[in-house]
Amino acid sequence: MKFFLDSASLDEIKAAKDMGLLDGVTTNPTLMSKEKADWHKVAEAICREVEGPVSLEVVGTTAEQMLAEAKELVKYGPNVVVKIPMLLEGLKAVRSLREQGIDVNVTLVFQPLQALMAAKAGATYVSPFVGRVDAIGGDGMAMVEEILAIFRNYDLRTQVLVASVRNPLHVVRAALMGADVVTVPFAVLKDFVKHPLTDSGLESFLKDWEKVPKA
Ligand code: E4P
């Protein structure tokens, strides 16, 4: 499973790279707004820093607008993945971009048929938003399980990129299901290595080591 960082923060991206957990990056307009900087410069810096795929999202809502934006976005580097919202107009843009050989990540997916439509349009990635589904009382990871089953039934090559991740359990369940990618906020990524019993176990080892007679 690939680990993407869900962030537009260069500091977080560099930290994740140092942790060896940076297979790619996903951004969106909200994450870009948090950087309070010229997003063109932010996008350029991210694409330079990250070796793997970098998702940059369009804000147009017609295929024509999306294609015009995509033409500019891909100039930031060969690792740019154009992020397209799940709309009928978006699916038109997906088909056109894939014909041009441009990778596409279909985002804002909340039910399996949307994912199937994205795959039929040839999307490189589809991003089901699990945290937001959970937040309204649904089971986001159950949605992912259905999407994976549908994709396996028809040998669809679109990669399932689990998004809107809120906790390590989302990541564990994604891995158990065989999702291709998870995109994770830095705050959650840091928790991957944590467990209270590890901390207490190490503390008692070190404390007991103090009792070992030393020459
Ligand atoms: C993917 O990049 C999505 O835009 C992102 O995971 C959404 O997460 P959120 O639900 O925390 O906004």
Image: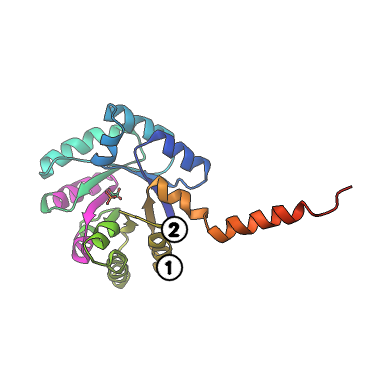
Report if the CB atoms under discs 2 and 1 are less than 8 Å apart: no
Say whether residue 187 is magenta: no
Q: Which residue is mark 1?
A: 176
Q: Which residue is mark 2?
A: 1
Q: Which residues are magenta?
A: 90-117
Residue that appears at 27% across and 26% down: 38
Residue that appears at 77% across and 51% down: 210
Q: Secondary structure at mark 1?
A: helix
Quadrant assignment for the N terminus: bottom left
| Distance between the alpha carbons at the discs numbered 2 and 1 | 10 Å
Residue that appears at 28% across and 64% down: 140
**Residue 190 picture location, percent across and down:** 47, 48
Say whether residue 101 is magenta: yes
Q: Say left or right for 167 vs 115.
A: right
The three-letter code of the residue at mark 1 reads Leu
Mark 1 closeness class: few <14, some 14–19, many ≥20 residues within 10 Å: few
